Image: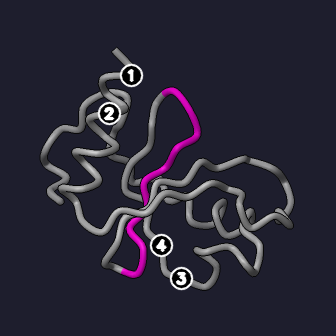
Amino acid sequence: MDKSIELPPPWYWTDIGLTVQLESEISKTHILYGRTTKTLARRQDNDDVLFLVDNEKFAVVHLTWVLKRLSDDQWPTTQFFDNWDDLYNKRILKDKEEFE
């Protein structure tokens, strides 16, 4: 993953950390609970955020922006990718096609 490479719309790199928002939403049974996350990118047209998880995997999370911890561990929805190529080809390029 090279942040000097431009992401295709609707994705863009961001330095705005959304880990606090993520942690405020997830329940203790959510797949990301207790894991180390770092914000990498966002979609410009919805609330999807790309996180690096435990410095090894990628997760696209659809934040809900509720003001309380969610009790359902299915929210916020989370999709994992094992590596950058998988994420880029199966999610970022797919989102680009749908966005155009």
Q: Which sits in the foreground, 39 or 76?
A: 76
Q: Which residue is mark 4?
A: 37
Q: Residue at x 73, y 79 (%)?
A: 29
Amino acid type for the residue under numbered disc 4 = Thr
Q: Secondary structure at mark 2?
A: helix
Residue 87 image point, x, y percent: 29, 53
Q: Residue 73 is drawn in which quadrant?
A: bottom right
Query: Marks 2 and 1: in contact by CB < 8 Å?
Result: yes
Residue 36 image point, x, y percent: 49, 80
Q: Secondary structure at mark 3?
A: loop
Query: Marks 3 and 1: in contact by CB < 8 Å?
Result: no
Q: Residue at x 23, y 38 (%)?
A: 7
Q: Is residue 20 above or below residue 33?
A: above
Q: Please report whichever mark, 4 or 2, sits nearer to the chain's N-terminal start.
A: 4
Kindly report the secondary structure that dominates the magenta region of the rendered protein.
Answer: strand
Q: Residue 24 is drawn in which quadrant?
A: bottom right
The label nearer to you, 1 versus 3, is 1
Distance (Cα) linking label 4 and label 1: 27 Å
Query: Marks 4 and 3: in contact by CB < 8 Å?
Result: yes
- The tag on residue 4 is none
Q: Which residue is mark 1?
A: 98
Amino acid type for the residue under numbered disc 2 = Lys
> Callout 2: few (<14), some (14-19), or many (20+) C-alpha neighbours within 10 Å?
few
Amino acid type for the residue under numbered disc 1 = Glu
Q: Which residue is mark 3?
A: 35
Give the magenta range: 45-54
Distance (Cα) linking label 1 and label 2: 6 Å
Q: Secondary structure at mark 1?
A: helix
